[in-house]
Image (tube, rainbow, N blue to C red):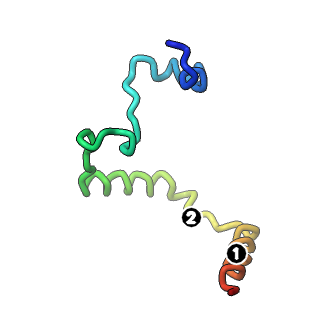
Amino acid sequence: MTGTKDERAVPEAARAETAGSVIAFPSAQRPRAQRRAVDAAVRERIGRGLRLHYADILAQPVPDRLLTLLDALADTEAQP
């Protein structure tokens, strides 16, 4: 470790967990030539996996308090 500000901001456990691994940067930070498109089949597989993973959460009812807040927001936006 060089002790840079960015490295100090990462918890020690996370640094140990990623030691020796390559850190991937978001595509917006990569030069355009290094960006790779994700094909439709991969996107579909990722989407299916996420839906399966979060299915039980999505099946839960929306809390009344949140519905009340959403209704109040909709009323505010509807007023000129």
34, above or below 11, in the image: below
Residue labelled with disc 2: 59
Front-most of 80 and 39?
80
* Residue 60 located left or right of residue 27: right
- Disc 2 crowd, CA 10 A, few/some/many (<14, 14-19, 20+): few
x and y percent of residue 9 in the render? Answer: 60, 26
Residue at 40% across, 36% down: 25
x and y percent of residue 4 in the render? Answer: 54, 19
Which element type, helix, strand or loop, lies under badge 2? loop
x and y percent of residue 74 in the render? Answer: 67, 79
* Residue 42 located left or right of residue 5: left
Residue labelled with disc 1: 73
> Where does the C terminus fall, quadrant-wise?
bottom right
Q: Which residue type does callout 2 highlight?
A: Ala
Front-most of 6 and 16?
6
Could you tell me how far apart the alpha carbons at marks 1 and 2 are, in whole angstroms?
A: 24 Å
Front-most of 5 and 22?
5
On the image, which quarter does residue 77 sit in? bottom right
59, above or below 23, in the image: below
Q: Which mark is residue 4?
A: none
CB under 8 Å between callouts 1 and 2?
no
- Disc 1 crowd, CA 10 A, few/some/many (<14, 14-19, 20+): few
Which element type, helix, strand or loop, lies under badge 1? helix
Q: Which residue type does callout 1 highlight?
A: Leu
Residue at 54% across, 22% down: 7
x and y percent of residue 67 in the render? Answer: 70, 72
Query: In front: mark 1 or mark 2?
Result: 1
